[in-house]
Image (tube, rainbow, N blue to C red):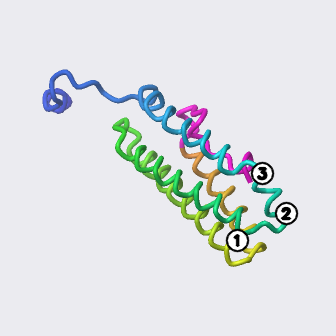
Amino acid sequence: MGASLLAAAPAGAEEVTRASYREAVEPICQDNTEANERILHGVRAMVRHEKLEASSRRFLRAAKALRGTLAQLRVVPRPPGDQARLSRWLGFVAAEAELLAKTGRYLAMGKRPGAEGLVVRLEGTARRANNVVFAFEFKYCRFEPSRFT
């Protein structure tokens, strides 16, 4: 049975490993991390000083950037043994993008306490996402909202 599965694989196709997957996605995540550093720089102070409209725009831009990153990550071939794990991780990343956007919308409406609650949920979601892919030893694909918010 195993030999027939190997024979079914296209000739010359390399199997995707965790290491090769990490090498493929880390530059994508690095670009997003650097964009978030620029976009969300000083946003905590902005919220503290009641500059909610400006901070709202920054959260919405960060959400858009993360959605773009997610689209790029979804097309990268995944290791066969980690399909479910990476699908779960990408689901968490999608949830993080939605939480960023929702935080931006709350700030635009002047709902600072609600936005702060969403940031707490964002941090929990990021922690769960990072735990799912702990074995990959990501550097940039570890989402750490506390660095920005």
Q: On screen, 25 above or below 100?
A: above
Mark 3 or mark 1, which has the lower sequence index? 3
Percent coordinates x, y for residue 95 in the rendering: 54, 61
Depth order, front residue of 83/60: 60
Q: Is residue 139 above or below residue 132?
A: above
Q: Which residue is mark 1?
A: 107
- Nearest the eye: 20 or 79: 20
What residue is drawn where x is 46% and y is 35%? 25
The alpha-carbon separation of the residues under discs 3 and 1 comes to 15 Å
Q: Which residue matches tag 3?
A: 42
Do labels 3 and 1 touch, CB within 8 Å? no
In the rendered image, residue 41 lying in the magenta stretch gets the answer no
SS category of the residue bearing label 3 = loop
What kind of secondary structure does the magenta stretch mostly adopt? loop
Specify the segment rendered in magenta: 133-149
> In the picture shown, does residue 108 fall above or below 81?
below
Q: Amino acid at mark 1?
A: Leu
The residue that label 2 is drawn on is 48
The answer to which quarter of the image holds residue 79 is top left
**Residue 143 magenta:** yes
- Mark 2: which amino acid? Arg
Q: Amino acid at mark 3?
A: Gly
* N-term-proximal mark, 2 vs 3: 3
Judge from the rendering whether residue 137 lies leftward or rightward of residue 118; answer left or right: left
As helix, strand or loop, the secondary structure at mark 2 comes to helix
Q: Residue at 23% of width from left, 25% of height from top?
A: 13
Q: Quadrant of the N terminus?
A: top left
In the rendered image, the residue lying farthest to the top is 12
Q: Quadrant of the C terminus?
A: bottom right
Q: CA distance from mark 2 to mark 3?
A: 10 Å
Residue depicted at x 73% and y 77%: 111
Please give the name of the residue rendered at 67% of the width and 73% of the height, measured from the top-left corner: 108
